[in-house]
Structure formats: structure tokens, C-alpha cells
Amino acid sequence: MGIIAWILIGLLAGAIAKALMPGKDPGGIIVTMLIGIAGGLLGGWLGKVIFGVDSIDGFFDLSTWVAAIAGSLILLVLYRLVTGNRRSHGHA
């Protein structure tokens, strides 16, 4: 898959991850899109490393989308943990 396909998958995976984990994020839509793109790459890499499968077979393969969404969810949780701690210290 080309870089344009990864960006599209990442953008959509980020939006899906945000819908699955609603809440207020300090970064807004731009950060959510970047998390989605990075999450897509992370999910593809984890699929290869942990499960030994090629989870980036193609744009319309279910495994590609599951991996991208899972990676986006992981990064969204980590982002909220990091920024949540930063915000709570600022109000103390």
C-alpha cells in the first residue's frame, strides 16, 4: 500500500477510535488525525511482530482495519494518560 492509503486508513481509524472512546482531548481534530495515522502504522507493526501475520495486506482487508483501529486506540489511551496527568497538575 502507498503512503496515501496509509494516511486515509489512519484518518479513518483515528475517527473510529475517537468514536469508540469519546471524551475531551486537548489536542483537537488535528492530534486525533495524527494519532490515527501513527496508530495505523503501530497496529500493522504489532500485527506482524506479535501475531506473525501480515496485517497490511490491502486497503479493503479487514485485518488492515482492525490493526489500524487497535493501534489508534492504544495511542489514544496513552495520549490521554500523558495529557491527563499534565492537565491535572496544572489545576492543583
Image: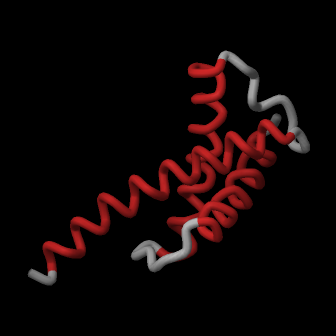
Q: Tell me: residue 7, above or below residue 2.
A: below
* 83 on left or right of 12: left
* 24 on left or right of 81: right
- Count of marks overlaid on the render: 0
Q: Position of residue 18 (x, y in %)?
A: 60, 67
Q: Position of residue 47 (x, y in %)?
A: 64, 28
Q: Position of residue 66 (x, y in %)?
A: 73, 44
* 34 on left or right of 9: left
Quadrant in the picture for the C terminus: bottom left
Residue at screen point 50% across, 66% down: 31
Work out whether residue 58 or residue 50 is closer to the camera in this orientation and state it. 50
Q: Position of residue 1 (x, y in %)?
A: 82, 34
Residue at screen point 40% across, 76% down: 26
- Residue farthest along the right direction in this orientation: 60
Residue at screen point 88% across, 39% down: 61
Residue 13 found in image quarter:
bottom right
Residue at screen point 77% across, 45% down: 65
Q: Tell me: residue 13, above or below residue 70.
A: below
Q: What is the image's colouring?
A: secondary structure
Residue 83 found in image quarter:
bottom left
- Residue farthest along the left direction in this orientation: 92
- Residue farthest along the top direction in this orientation: 52
